[in-house]
């Protein structure tokens, strides 16, 4: 590479590029904001002129969509995207896809990957994610031998172990590139008892005070009664230090909105900026069909003052509008949940943590160091800021100084396997390997990292799942039955859908019934969330599903399989029924207490389930015809993710 071109790269980027040019797979570990994407862009820029194709995988659809937009600006018609929601230019030399789609291809359609030379895994540390890490691990286990790897990650302390597993798995050398320094260093501040400290050692923590505070505090929904840390104090300080724009991370959607409203009396924009942002927001609302949306009208007064909020419960189009406003630098303070930090390239000068605890699936605990820096890393704009500023709001009832120091100054957590193969994966593997299926486990990261006792437990779990599948008739005489062939295409919800398929219950459902079932299969209610109204058509479906899930749970308990398969929840039945009948989105939103953004997400997830059933070779012509009609009716207006992305 010419010297003048190489000069634009940092040390670790040059090192990675050198390995790529020498034909190696590369694993890169570097802090958030260090510039890992530039390495991926180098591969793309090098490969496309040589007629080599690349797959780029991302952990969430929002990140996949953003990468599609970004790369489309650079590489134009050479970019495509394939997710459960969207299929645009799927034969392009650069194809972006969610990791689930890629995993499915490696297991079921390996031949379709022959034309690709590189697989780029963004946020590879997601393999440590409890709910979805299995997908990353399976993708890497079944990666075709001809594909070279570029894995990009936040800091991984056990990167050598991870690389050693990949090298052993694929019988090839994996080059490791590490960068520990951030291009923009971070400066930490702490708000405690409504004072701002720039050194944690200057804070006088009092264990007795914390204990007394915990005993007497009275909680309103999101307002501690004592209110020691005033938001106004912190915002005035940050603005006074000229440390805007600011990303303020909270771990509850409603609180993001509440806090934005709390500073609604502030105006961070001058007259010229107010005029610009008003004009831009109106243009975006027109472009994204938001002019008459109540949620857009609600946020407008905040936007005119340079304030916004952003979370998964919002309309996807409104989130997109807010993201574009933020990149325009006219939004000075944004209150958002943590997904805003995951790969999306939206840095600010400062970051605030409303709390240092979050909910981790089953319990609330102090932040992991890796998660903390995934968010804190958004502070400091490369090429614009000399340093980034991170503010932690410490409350007496959870301000454990040891934990605070561990979060900020501790070693990031090792990545660990979260392998828990789905029934669909087991069926696909059984079709290839038969009773030798446990041999595949020996290839896993879980096996590589575990002691013999844990390995034996994992092998026994696979055997138990095979036994259950035989018991239920998915496998007969060591071959997949018709029901087994149906189930292997439906990831995550195989058992209940296959039982409904076998009894021809699915074939007897009309479009409304299929929509009700699909949304019920994917829906996860909030704690104590109740069904507002259950349509008559949904009652029979719910009754049938309850009987099947009861039997499945009994058999999983018999074979000691944990966790149990998810059961359907019919909270969206009324909304699904009305949507199929042609009602508009505002009407179906009024039929549920589920947030607008979540409602759209569940409808799109339901569509993905219907598409998987439709793709199964075992599905009958009649079922496919009805499902295709249902998909067409559901996938309209605001539910149509592809229309939004194309727009």
Image (cartoon, grey):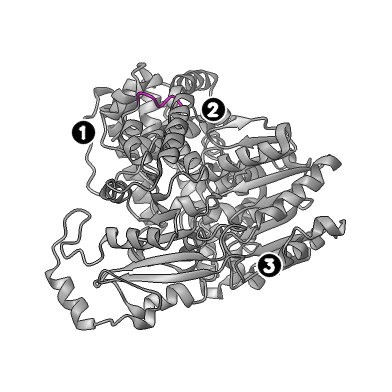
Q: Secondary structure at mark 3?
A: helix
Residue at the image point whose x is 26% and y is 36% from the top: 593
Q: Is residue 288 above or below residue 249?
A: above
- Residue 5 position within the rendered picture, expressed as x and y whole percent measured from the top left: 81, 55
Residue 91 in view (yes/no): no
Distance from Cα at disc 2 to Cα at disc 3: 38 Å
Q: Residues within 10 Å of mark 1 (few under 14, many from 20)?
A: few
Q: Position of residue 641 (x, y in %)?
A: 50, 30
Kindly identify the residue that appears in the image at 62 percent across and 58 percent down.
383
- Residue named by callout 3: 163
Q: Residue at x 44, y 19 (%)?
A: 633
User: Which residue occupies the foreground of this view, 600 or 449?
Assistant: 600
Task: Name the residue that disc number 2 marks.
Answer: 614
Secondary structure type for disc 2: helix
Give the residue at mark 1.
532
Q: Would residue 204 be seen by someone viewing this image from the given angle? A: yes
Q: Which residues are magenta?
A: 288-292
Is residue 291 one of those drawn in magenta? yes
Q: Residue at x 77, y 65 (%)?
A: 15
């Amino acid at each position: 590479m010419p010297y003048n071109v190489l000069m634009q790269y940092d040390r670790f980027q040059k090192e990675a590029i050198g390995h790529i040019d020498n034909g190696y797979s590369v694993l890169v570990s570097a802090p958030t904001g260090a510039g890992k994407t530039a390495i991926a862009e180098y591969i793309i820029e090098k490969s496309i002129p040589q007629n080599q194709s690349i797959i780029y995988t991302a952990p969430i659809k929002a990140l996949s969509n953003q990468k599609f937009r970004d790369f489309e600006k650079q590489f134009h018609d050479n970019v495509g995207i394939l997710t459960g929601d969207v299929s645009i230019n799927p034969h392009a030399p650069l194809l972006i896809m969610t990791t689930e789609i890629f995993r499915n291809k490696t297991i079921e359609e390996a031949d379709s990957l022959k034309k690709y030379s590189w697989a780029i895994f963004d946020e590879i540390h997601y393999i440590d994610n409890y709910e979805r890490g299995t997908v990353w691990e399976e993708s890497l286990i079944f990666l075709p031998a001809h594909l070279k790897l570029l894995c990009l990650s936040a800091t991984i302390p056990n990167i050598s172990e991870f690389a050693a597993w990949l090298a052993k798995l694929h019988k090839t050398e994996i080059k490791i590139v590490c960068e520990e320094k951030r291009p923009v260093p971070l400066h930490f501040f702490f708000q405690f008892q409504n004072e701002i400290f720039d050194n944690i050692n200057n804070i006088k923590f009092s264990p007795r005070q914390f204990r007394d505070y915990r005993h007497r505090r009275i909680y309103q929904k999101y307002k501690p009664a004592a209110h020691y840390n005033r938001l106004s104090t912190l915002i005035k300080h940050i603005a006074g230090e000229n440390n805007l724009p600011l990303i303020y991370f909270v771990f509850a959607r409603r609180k993001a909105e509440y806090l934005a409203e709390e500073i609604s009396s502030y105006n961070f924009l001058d007259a010229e900026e107010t005029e610009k942002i008003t004009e831009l927001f109106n243009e975006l609302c027109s472009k994204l069909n938001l002019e008459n949306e109540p949620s857009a009208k609600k946020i407008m007064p905040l936007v005119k003052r340079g304030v916004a909020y952003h979370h998964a419960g919002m309309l996807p189009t409104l989130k997109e509008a807010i993201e574009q406003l933020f990149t325009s630098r006219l939004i000075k303070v944004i209150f958002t949940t943590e997904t805003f930090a995951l790969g999306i390239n939206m840095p600010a000068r400062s970051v605030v943590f409303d709390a240092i605890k979050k909910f981790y699936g089953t319990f609330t605990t102090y932040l992991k160091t890796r998660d903390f820096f995934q968010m804190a890393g958004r502070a400091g704009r490369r090429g614009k800021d000399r340093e980034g500023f991170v503010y932690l709001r410490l409350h007496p009832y959870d301000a454990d100084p040891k934990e605070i120091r561990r979060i900020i100054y501790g070693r990031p957590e090792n990545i660990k396997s979260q392998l828990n193969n789905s029934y669909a994966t087991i069926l696909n593997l059984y079709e290839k390997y038969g009773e030798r299926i446990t041999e595949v486990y020996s290839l896993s990261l879980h096996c590589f990292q575990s002691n013999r006792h844990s390995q034996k437990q994992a092998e026994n779990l696979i055997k138990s799942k095979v036994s259950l599948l035989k018991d239920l008739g998915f496998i007969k005489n060591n071959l997949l039955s018709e029901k087994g062939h149906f189930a292997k295409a439906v990831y995550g919800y195989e058992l209940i859908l296959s039982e409904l398929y076998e009894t021809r219950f699915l074939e007897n459902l009309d479009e409304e019934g299929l929509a009700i079932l699909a949304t019920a299969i994917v829906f996860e209610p909030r704690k104590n969330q109740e069904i507002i109204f259950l349509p008559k058509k949904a009652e029979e479906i719910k009754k049938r599903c309850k009987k099947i899930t009861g039997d499945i749970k009994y058999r999983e308990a018999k074979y000691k399989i944990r966790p149990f398969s998810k059961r359907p929840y019919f909270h969206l039945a009324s909304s699904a029924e009305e949507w199929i009948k042609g009602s508009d989105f505002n009407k179906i939103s009024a039929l549920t207490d589920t947030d607008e953004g979540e409602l759209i997400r569940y409808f799109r997830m339901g569509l993905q389930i219907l598409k998987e059933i439709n793709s199964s070779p075992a599905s009958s012509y009649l079922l496919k015809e009805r499902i295709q009609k249902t998909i067409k009716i559901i996938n309209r207006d605001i539910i149509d993710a592809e229309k939004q992305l194309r727009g």
